[in-house]
Image (cartoon, rainbow, N blue to C red):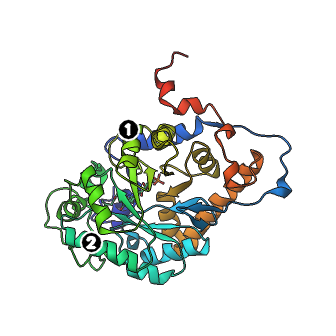
Amino acid sequence: MWGAKDNPKKMFHDYYQSGAEGEHTLNTTRDAFNSIKLKARALGDADAFKGTETTFLGHKIASPICLAPTAFHMLVNPEGECATARAAAGTKTLQCLSTWSNCSLEEVAEAAPDNLRILQCYFSRSDEVNKDIFERAEKAGYKALAVTVDTQILGNREADAENKFSLPKGIKMGTIAKYTSTHVTGVEGSGLDEYVRKYKHNGFTWKDILKIRQFTSLPIILKGIQCKEDAAKAVEYGADAIWVSNHGARQLDTTPASIEVLEECVQGVDGKIEVYFDGGVRRGTDVLKALALGASAVFIGRPQLWGLAIDGQKGVEDVLKILNSELQRSMILTDCQEVKDITKERVIHSAYCSPKYLTAKI
Ligand SMILES: Cc1cc2nc3c(=O)[nH]c(=O)nc-3n(C[C@H](O)[C@H](O)[C@H](O)COP(=O)(O)O)c2cc1C
Ligand SMILES: CC(C)CC(=O)C(=O)O
């Protein structure tokens, strides 16, 4: 068998694909989506279909399917996140750029100047660095900050440890290059742990959300909410939106699939702020289910990386177009003429996704 040392493509593939520990959450996510059934409706007027246009924090997007922040796009394409940004622009949707992008946030903004973009943030130990990043983001036209709240420490990704993951020479950490380095000291295990240890502020807690407010006027989205208590707390701490996510099942193994906790998180915010969603979205029907259960936009992680690996910008655009055409078909067959028609009534057995189901005797 190839070792990662002989075959870097294996190292990159494993990094993109893998989940935490036994990958139980990763492996049950498809079943969770498939256990939710859609209600087909007869004789909806397909000619009256209006489309998938919607809004994100008041900004127009052509589709509720957006690009999630995923680190290190240059592992599979020399144009990296600039190619992904152009794909988002080509389909008029939103890109959320990772703190750990290979292209800098300024390069990405320049690659697709008119596109709607937001920046995912991991917090540095240095407030000066954080302030600098927020200012750079604002200046480069990013419209919100998505603060990741599920990664106080990195999940146990066994494949990365076995492969001794590290970035190849010559691949920079574009956005944070001026504050940290890609040098790995050769410790045991995954170089990713070292990158994170060197840069990230693991003592960043709820009170620091209030601090961010003083540093920036950009809207703040909390990414990685997984229960109604935290959803309610996000409102209490002044978040402008929450993003229900288990980080692609890469953090804590044996948590529910994100789709299983979406409804309770929606209940937690009680209509006060928008709710976004990611985790295992692979079909238009998945998008419809997430919207029906209360999300106003969904994000895709790995599918964009597979598209990027296969055909660069065009590959990512193809992924977005296929998903959006599947969404349109599903909307028509459930008699939804526009995104606002995608309500809870489109789903049968939504009770299976609520905590009541877990305790009910049925
Ligand atoms: C290779 C990879 C890198 C990721 N990097 C980040 C990141 O830098 N910041 C972050 O908040 N989430 C990151 N995520 C999580 C995604 O934003 C998203 O939550 C998840 O991938 C969605 O699940 P999906 O891949 O099943 O679509 C990453 C996910 C993957 C697969
Ligand atoms: C560099 C990593 C912390 C990026 C990430 O969030 C991930 O790999 O899931």
> Looking at the image, which residue is at 34% across and 69% down?
216
User: Which of the 4 quarters of the picture holds residue 182?
Assistant: bottom left
Q: Residue at x 23, y 72 (%)?
A: 129
Residue 280 drawn above or below residue 350 = below
Q: Nearer the viewer, residue 165 or 205?
A: 205
Which of 197 and 48 lies nearest the eye of the viewer?
Answer: 48
Disc ID at residue 229 = 1
- Where is residue 22? Give x, y as percent: 34, 40
Using the image, tell me which numbered label, if any, was put on residue 138: none
User: Disc 2 marks which residue?
Assistant: 131
The residue drawn where x is 27% and y is 72% is 131
Q: Is residue 340 above or below residue 212?
A: above
Give x and y (percent) for residue 8: 33, 67
Whether residue 122 is visible here, answered yes or no, is: no
Q: Residue 203 at what x, y percent from top left? A: 19, 53
Instruction: Name the amino acid type tagged 2.
Output: Lys
Q: Does residue 230 show up?
A: yes
